[in-house]
């Protein structure tokens, strides 16, 4: 069986590099989405603080 060579790499090497890249890409995506979901869940569980009443210009100038 002859090896298919692409840019000095055999087909097996190209497939191995592609598989490693896809593994890193998908793992990074899962970590990113998990982090975003964790931060959002933490934000939703915090009690909502009463916001201070906005100051009007008349009161601010006194």
Image (cartoon, rainbow, N blue to C red):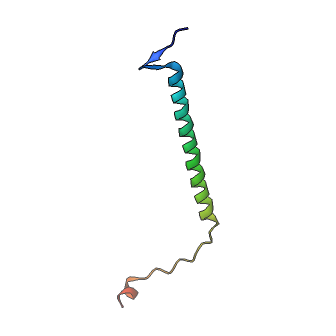
Q: Position of residue 28 (x, y in %)?
A: 54, 44
Q: Which residue is drawn at 57% across and 39% down?
A: 26
Q: In the rendered view, does 10 fall on the left or right side of 30?
A: left
Q: Residue at x 55, y 30 (%)?
A: 19
**Residue closest to the eye, 5 or 61:** 5
Where 1 sits versus 9, above or below?
above
**Residue closest to the eye, 22 or 40:** 22
Location of the C terminus (image quadrant): bottom left
- Could you tell me how many numbered marks the image carries? 0
Where 39 sits versus 61, above or below?
above
Q: Which residue is drawn at 62% across and 72% down?
A: 47
Q: Where is residue 10 in the image (x, y as percent from the top left)?
A: 49, 19
Q: In the rendered view, does 2 fall on the left or right side of 60?
A: right
Q: Position of residue 61 (x, y in %)?
A: 35, 88
**Residue closest to the eye, 41 or 5:** 5
Q: In the rendered view, does 55 fall on the left or right side of 15?
A: left
Q: Position of residue 2 (x, y in %)?
A: 52, 9
Q: Which residue is drawn at 51% across and 19% down?
A: 11
Quick one: which residue is furthest to the left in this view?
Answer: 61
Q: In which quarter of the image is residue 41?
A: bottom right
Where 43 sits versus 54, above or below?
above
Quick one: which residue is furthest to the top in this view?
Answer: 1
Location of the N terminus (image quadrant): top right
Quick one: which residue is furthest to the right in this view?
Answer: 45
**Residue closest to the eye, 18 or 35:** 18
């Amino acid at each position: 069986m002859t090896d298919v060579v692409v840019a000095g790499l055999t087909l097996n090497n190209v497939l191995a590099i592609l598989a490693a890249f896809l593994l890193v890409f998908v793992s990074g995506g899962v970590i990113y989405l998990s982090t975003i979901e964790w931060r959002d869940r933490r934000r939703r569980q915090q009690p909502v603080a009463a916001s201070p009443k906005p100051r009007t210009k008349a009161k601010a100038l006194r």
